[in-house]
Amino acid sequence: MDKHGEVNKEQPINVFWMRYDDKGEKKELSYIQRKFAYGIVSKDLGNGQFELRFVSHKKLPMYLRKSTADKKYHVYATINDKKMEIDRIFLRIEGALSGSRT
């Protein structure tokens, strides 16, 4: 959000790691992670709405828009034919590259 309460159109969502093994520390994604795995590509749909997709899994569109109930921005997706509000996404990584800590 900018100082006027508007979504940053260049980067409407901030993706980061919550490192539970490192005392819950927040850590930014690396360049490789952002560009090829866990980064988000956004498309401005106008009217303060954005389509969001993972760079590595474009099949699941998510949408950032302001809720009519609380007037705050939330992310929504349709999963198993049900519309859901997404608060956070947990990823379990198996077979990570040797030496990487994700």
Image: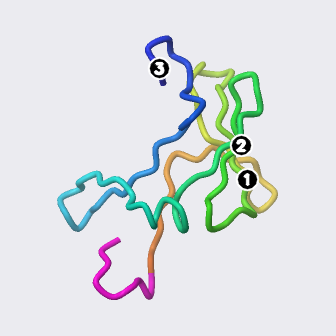
Question: Is label 1 or label 3 in front?
Answer: 3
Q: Quadrant of residue 18?
A: bottom left
Amino acid at the residue labelled 2: Glu
Which numbered tag is attached to residue 51? 2
Residue 2's disc is: 3
Dot 1 or dot 3, earlier in sequence:
3
**Residue 61 bears which disc, if any?**
1
User: Is 78 rendered above or below residue 99?
Assistant: above
Could you say which is closer to the camera, residue 54 or residue 35? Answer: 35
Q: Which residues are magenta?
A: 94-102
**Residue 70, image x, y percentages:** 58, 21
Q: Residue 66 occupies which quadrant of the picture?
A: top right
Residue that appears at 42% across and 61% down: 31
Residue plotted at (71% across, 41% down): 43
Quadrant (top left/top right/bottom left/bottom right) for the C terminus: bottom left
Q: Does residue 99 appear to the left or right of 36 in the view shown?
A: left
Q: Position of residue 63 (x, y in %)?
A: 69, 42
**Could you tell whether 77 is left or right of 19 in the image?**
right
- Give yes or no for residue 32 being in the magenta stretch: no
